[in-house]
Image (cartoon, grey):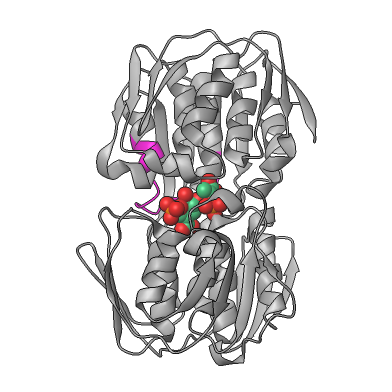
């Protein structure tokens, strides 16, 4: 366990930083490059633990992948050339890897077993097992398919029409990827729009995939053609500094080349609603994934209500939004976010528990939290509980907390943002 000693900043944050590559897009670039025929080049790849685990899983499936920092070359031979792995596939801490990979493996002609770390062992897998079984998949797990390890004996699948019981891009993507290998058409109906990186990137690999309202359809037996992928900075990583820039007095910072796909920009909408001084500059809307520079200045915030269709557009940002809310005038209510309970940790309970140690006033509810604002935070011994987003949120909290903060299990941050403390030091002028 790594314990990190942190303290309140004496000055505001200033300067410009590059935000590391988007995690969701990096996973998909590896996976789709592995399914395609030909050489796929990826730039801006996120060399975080989750995405490195995706690389190692696909290497075990026989794919030649050369990774050098943020550059990756995948020499794909086509879907039909993936090979039965000799060992258990280990996804580490990554929910995205296990769910999307299961969708792919369900339609291939061999046996595989997938597992991850202690957090993955507690996360729900029935949400992918159920629809994949409806497509004819032979997939199982502990407790009737609820939990890992998962075993998959790939076989012929057929398309289905499936209404998602929860708004989840991982479940949508698992079904669409199985649909790519299946006979006939597969249609997924989303209750609310979730991130659409799978749809955008499959299109870039030459696959035809159609959206009509909240329905996404794919024809089976299509082939992917290798391409080049440019991964923009991860708005979910940028979020920690967007909030830091807003709440650390006298800050003014610019985050360079951040993805602004509209299915991901809920954090920008919420910060603007809270009264933050935030501007997007140098927007590029033409790219497969749009991006921009984002500038934020310290400003006084006020509480807001967050719920409904915006939730999937900011689901991973709720821990850092909760911190912003502790500094806002008035109360912030977050609802319709029960999905937070099945992330790397129960993010409703852990946000409340850890921020309360620093003096925050947070009530948990069944599907969110009520955060009372205008709180002076104080240093404390806090713990990431092995959850990268909790770790980063607590590190940002320490920059405004009186006294010293000790962050236990700070190593979890490497899952999505290996250079996080370097970025923080750079902006703090250390
Ligand atoms: O598809 C993806 O890349 C992701 C989807 C979201 O999960 P759900 O699909 O479970 O909502 C998100 O929380 C996760 O960090 C990444
Ligand atoms: C929930 C997350 O990721 P995953 O589901 O891929 O583990 C996250 O990055 O916050």
310 with respect to 114 (left or right) = left
Q: Is residue 343 magenta?
A: no
Total numbered labels: 0
Magenta residue span = 255-269
Measured as percent of width and height from the top left, residue 53 is found at 68, 62
Measured as percent of width and height from the top left, residue 282 is found at 44, 49
Q: Residue at x 23, y 62 (%)?
A: 214
Image quadrant where one finds the N terminus: top right
Question: Which is more toward the observer, 273 or 390?
Answer: 390
Q: Does 84 appear above or below 302?
A: below
Q: Does 204 appear above or below 379?
A: below
Direction left: furthest residue: 213
Question: Which is more toward the observer, 79 or 1?
Answer: 1
Q: Is residue 266 magenta?
A: yes
Quadrant of res 173:
bottom left
Q: Residue at x 72, y 34 (%)?
A: 410
Question: Which is more toward the observer, 310 or 246?
Answer: 310
Q: Residue at x 69, y 41 (%)?
A: 412
Direction right: furthest residue: 2
Measured as percent of width and height from the top left, residue 44 is found at 62, 60
349 with respect to 44 (left or right) = left
Res 151 seen here: yes
Measured as percent of width and height from the top left, residue 421 is found at 71, 35
224 with respect to 66 (left or right) = left
Image quadrant where one finds the C terminus: top right
Quadrant of res 393:
top right
Res 232 seen here: no
Q: Does 184 appear above or below 21?
A: below
Q: Does 330 appear above or below 426?
A: above
Q: Residue at x 64, y 33 (%)?
A: 391
Question: Which is more toward the observer, 34 or 99?
Answer: 99
């Amino acid at each position: 366990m790594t314990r990190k000693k942190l303290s309140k900043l004496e000055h505001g944050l200033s300067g410009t930083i590059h935000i590391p590559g988007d995690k969701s897009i990096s996973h998909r670039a590896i996976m789709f490059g592995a399914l395609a025929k030909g050489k796929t080049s990826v730039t801006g790849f996120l060399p975080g633990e989750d995405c490195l685990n995706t690389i190692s899983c696909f290497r075990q499936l026989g794919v030649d992948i050369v990774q050098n920092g943020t550059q990756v070359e995948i020499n794909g031979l086509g879907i039909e050339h993936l090979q039965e792995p000799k060992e258990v596939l280990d996804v580490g801490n990554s929910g995205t890897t296990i769910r999307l990979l299961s969708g792919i493996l369900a339609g291939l002609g061999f046996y595989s077993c997938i597992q991850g770390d202690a957090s993955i062992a507690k996360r729900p897998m029935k949400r992918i097992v159920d629809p994949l079984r409806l497509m004819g998949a032979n997939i199982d797990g502990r407790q009737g398919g609820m939990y890992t390890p998962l075993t998959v004996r790939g076989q012929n699948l057929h398309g289905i029409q499936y209404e998602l019981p929860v708004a989840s891009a991982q479940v949508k993507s698992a079904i669409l990827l199985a649909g790519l290998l299946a006979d006939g058409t597969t249609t997924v109906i989303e209750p609310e729009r979730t991130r659409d990186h799978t749809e955008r990137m499959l299109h870039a690999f030459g696959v035809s995939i159609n959206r009509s309202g909240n329905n996404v359809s794919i024809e089976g037996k299509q082939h992917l053609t290798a391409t080049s992928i440019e991964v923009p900075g991860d708005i979910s990583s940028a979020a920690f500094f967007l909030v830091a820039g807003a709440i650390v007095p006298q800050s003014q910072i610019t985050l360079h080349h951040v993805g602004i796909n509209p299915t991901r920009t809920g954090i920008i909408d919420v910060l603007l609603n809270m009264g933050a001084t935030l501007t997007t500059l140098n927007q590029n809307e033409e790219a497969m994934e749009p991006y921009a520079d984002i500038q934020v200045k310290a400003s006084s915030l006020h509480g807001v209500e967050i719920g409904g269709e915006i939730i999937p557009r900011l689901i991973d940002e709720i821990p850092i939004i909760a911190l912003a809310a502790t500094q806002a005038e008035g109360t912030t209510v977050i609802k319709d976010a029960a999905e937070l309970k099945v992330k790397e940790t129960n993010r409703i309970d852990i946000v409340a528990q850890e921020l309360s140690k620093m003096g925050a006033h947070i009530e948990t509810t069944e599907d969110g939290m009520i955060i009372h604002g205008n709180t002076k935070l104080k240093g404390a011994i806090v713990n990431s509980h092995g959850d990268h987003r909790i770790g980063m949120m607590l590190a940002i909290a320490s920059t405004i907390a009186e006294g010293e903060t000790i962050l236990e299990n700070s190593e979890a941050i490497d899952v999505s943002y290996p250079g996080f403390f370097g970025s923080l030091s750079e902006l703090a002028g250390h």
